[in-house]
Image (tube, coloured by chain):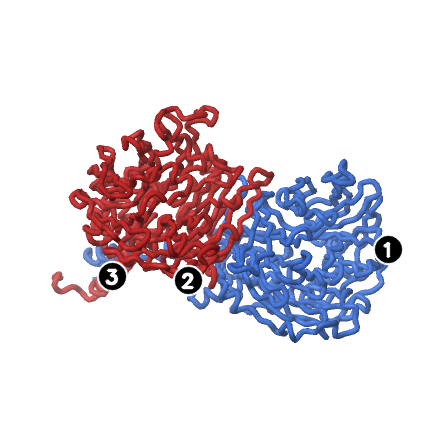
Chain colours: A red, B blue
Amino acid sequence: MSILNPPRGRGIVAALCFVLLLLVAGIAIAQDAPPPLTDEEMEEATQIYFDRCAGCHGALRGGATGPGLLPEATLVRGVPYLHAIMFGGLPGGMPDFGRQGFLDAEELDLIARFLLLDPPDPPQISMDQIRESWQVYVDVEDRPTEPQHDMDWQDFFGVILRDMGQVAIVDGDSKELVTLLDTGYAIHILRASQSGRYFQSIGRDGRASLIDLWMDPPAVVAEVKPCYDARSIESSKFAGFEDAYAIVGCYWPPLFTIHDGETLEPLKMVSTAGYERGAGNYVPEARVAAIVASHFFPEWIVNVKESGQTWLVDYSTLDQPGQPMPVTMIDTELFLHDGGWANHRYFIVAANALDTLVVIDAETRTVAANVPAGTIPHPGRGANWVHPEYGPVWATGNLGSPEMTVVGAAPDTHPEHAWQVVSSVELPFTGTLFNKTHPESPWVIIDFVMSPSPVGAATLCAIDKVSLEAETCWEVPGAQELGARMVHIEFNRAGTEFWVSAWGRMDTPTFIAVYDAVTLEEVARVEGDWVRTPTGKFNAHNTALDIY
Amino acid sequence: MSILNPPRGRGIVAALCFVLLLLVAGIAIAQDAPPPLTDEEMEEATQIYFDRCAGCHGALRGGATGPGLLPEATLVRGVPYLHAIMFGGLPGGMPDFGRQGFLDAEELDLIARFLLLDPPDPPQISMDQIRESWQVYVDVEDRPTEPQHDMDWQDFFGVILRDMGQVAIVDGDSKELVTLLDTGYAIHILRASQSGRYFQSIGRDGRASLIDLWMDPPAVVAEVKPCYDARSIESSKFAGFEDAYAIVGCYWPPLFTIHDGETLEPLKMVSTAGYERGAGNYVPEARVAAIVASHFFPEWIVNVKESGQTWLVDYSTLDQPGQPMPVTMIDTELFLHDGGWANHRYFIVAANALDTLVVIDAETRTVAANVPAGTIPHPGRGANWVHPEYGPVWATGNLGSPEMTVVGAAPDTHPEHAWQVVSSVELPFTGTLFNKTHPESPWVIIDFVMSPSPVGAATLCAIDKVSLEAETCWEVPGAQELGARMVHIEFNRAGTEFWVSAWGRMDTPTFIAVYDAVTLEEVARVEGDWVRTPTGKFNAHNTALDIY
């Protein structure tokens, strides 16, 4: 019996066997899914994802500022590719987490494998968890009753060192570093309490910190982490409630939380998941964007981005049994993102995906107007001044078009210009995130930080408040060499100088350029080993009093 | 070569093959999951489940009134068992859907297979869908401006024919059927608009119907289906807003919707999913239970059951741009279920899982008290009268203990008894769902419809309003023979008679027994082929004016 000539019977068995083998192989191929993570790995990966990735790629991994990271996008790329991107970053804004030492090789591998799998249900949060995260480092009764140092604390700048997870307190007069504070990761904004004594910072990782500027040195006196991904924080500012409460607006879970203003003790949490205006589809990720505190009522004006609503959150009855809290839900516009006060009364918010500005009248608590802007308006808080012809105006830059949109903002005194675009100031670049001014300066200063051109990203323009022309634009020397983008303008308390950050890489110190608010001459640079990834800067006085 | 003595080579191949076969078989066993449904089957099954099953077994199949139906419970039972139960019903309340012809064999098989699978994400709903479901059968301008018949429409009874999906309008005087109307499935309650002209019905399937009693015959003039599973509906009753708006409270999706009061046009929808009071866990299925319309403010008092909150929903600004709607969120108590007005000012709601009554003061908009009740209090809307010693009192029956709980309800005039249990009236049975009285009757009448004893379920008791004793209890003749349970008491407009339903099976007509409100003698029976599965009955006048 030769092996080359097997008996027929064996041939049949072998053939059958071959079919079975194919079947098994076929099943094996069908099951060639990415290997699952252990429970511990999943927990760790979920946490890292939320801290580092969810802000841009979305809690549900559907994409937002960054691309979607669902398996249909990641599986074709595979672990080595994803690992490499996370190690080295990408020009569009993807950080080089590995090169900068934020995530080690093991963590990068874990996240890459995590990204191949269906995203887990994003974690919820409970009041018990929030309470557990709450820390008071200095009790209220142990805090000073007057400033403990001789510096002009109202001229302090809170400088976000974005990727360092730090806030630097810098003296506006000497421009010296006062202290360096550990805060949440990638602080999105600072706000000041009505008294100006406290800065509140909110990290993209949901960590809120309360900074007491009266201490020597200023210090974080309380912290709380009400969510995994947050963008906004604000203080209560209505007469009688100054510094009494704080609100945090979250991206994930989609909710806002109310806290004691002096301790950050969590008091109340309210989900913002709900139905969008109009078609009324259910939006499980209806995130909280910009919040401002009304001076007309004891309430915050809260934008719920994906449901197209603005909620007026009344904090005046929180001390009663059952903590009753009236929330007035108004249909405004989809995708309300950022904005600020115009003419002390109107909260102008960019519906950025609709190229529209929505004007909310805080006194009548209604929508006053929708105003067409440029492409993807991004005001930050915008800029206010009084124009000789148009009266009080407010202006925003635009991410997608090279123009600053100037809007008449005084229906009482200048009704013919109110909520009209009185000028679209021509600019050399797109990519604006911020513009700002001060009553003492004849200029509105504007950045082009997101310009695809490195020259644009390093350039600033000064727009004449009267002629509404970009009279002077200049590339900031040294920025390009450091791979830095010039971002976010803030004036000092007196309005005599403005500061602009050179936002670079974590491994290289950069600088903050300081300019004369009239002559536009550079008068100083804030430098030092600590000046890494500076972005937003907030003057205590100007922030407390909404001067911009 | 004998088959009994195969060559060694073939033996090895066969052995290998056997291992492979085992492997394949093993994989087959490991994959012995229930067969999936096609997309169409899944859609049909989901719809049927929501219409017929979700009310008792939960939208997420986690169980509620009925047991949980997740795969860990259903897989061990299998399709034939589930099919049989759904065909023939169970004594505990499971309907015999098959025997009664509601679901055919194919549908029962489909649902049985559906129940073996993980539940799909329950369907959401959008404003567009709600608008599509909205039907106006008679335009407002085509409706009569005065009653089109000579009957005393304010003495009409709206009788729920629960399992028929119908509401019968019955003349309180002649006790004749006026008309039979198709409505939602298993109507949970009827409410009357402030004028009394309109009945509003809400089906467990989420279908809301507006019934105009002035038409000849009365007719459904508008319908809308804002959700898949609902329990409550209410009209706006504040001065100046009579009949203007309606609200529907839903179980799934968990939300409430606001409608035009005369057309049911959908105007606004608000999710109630959120964070529970206390530990603040996220509750995706925070359902809307009892709602009443305040007479003190232009608002509804809405209980959000699983989050332990009561929301005051202000409808006074819905006509303004953006439809602003203030919702005041108060932490009250978990599992608020049903309740009614006490002493015209206090909304008493049973936190039934906590054996507690929560007293909400509609004038001060706060929680006035928590009162311990019997086991699982179930007031329906409760019963009000003035006791010579205790003053105004309010009473509830209890599902789990044989007692009626009487609570002092007049803090102004009888503060020493207010929010105290002034009496626990001893009763012969448990299983009460409803008690009711009328100012003209010396009795509070109470049912034991959920009593495990057939005698109990057929028995009523009359409690003396002064002695607070169950003076007389009687088994209703003929009920047991029909397999019927006596349920829900309603008085006629004059308060001279009360009606109680014999709730039987769909295939057998039963009756509504009518009693003299003073002598307790049976004076009539409402009978007829149409009297099938009668449950709740609502007198137009008494319901509009909250007389109970």
Residue B31 picture quarter = bottom left
Is B351 placed above or below A400 here?
above
- The residue beneath circle 2 is B36
Residue A250 percent across, percent down from the top left: 42, 46
Camera-side residue of A24 and B345: B345
Name the residue at 65% across, 52% down: B297
Q: As shown in the figure, which amino acid type bears the numbered disc 1?
A: Val
Q: Chain of mark 2?
A: B
Q: Are marks 1 and 2 on the same chain?
A: yes
Name the residue at 72% across, 75% down: B216
Left or right of residue A2, residue A222 in this image: right
Name the residue at 68% across, 39% down: B372
Camera-side residue of B512 and B192: B192
- The residue beneath circle 3 is A22
In the picture, the quarter occupied by the N terminus of chain B is: bottom left
Name the residue at 60% across, 56% down: B315
Q: Chain of mark 3?
A: A
Q: As shown in the figure, which amino acid type bears the numbered disc 2?
A: Pro
- The residue beneath circle 1 is B518
Closer to the chain start, of discs 1 and 2, is 2
Q: Are marks 2 and 3 on the same chain?
A: no
| Mark-to-mark CA distance, 1 and 2 | 61 Å
| Mark-to-mark CA distance, 2 and 3 | 25 Å
Is residue B29 visible in the rendered image? The answer is no
Is residue B187 visible in the rendered image? The answer is yes
Per the rendering, the mark at residue B500 is: none
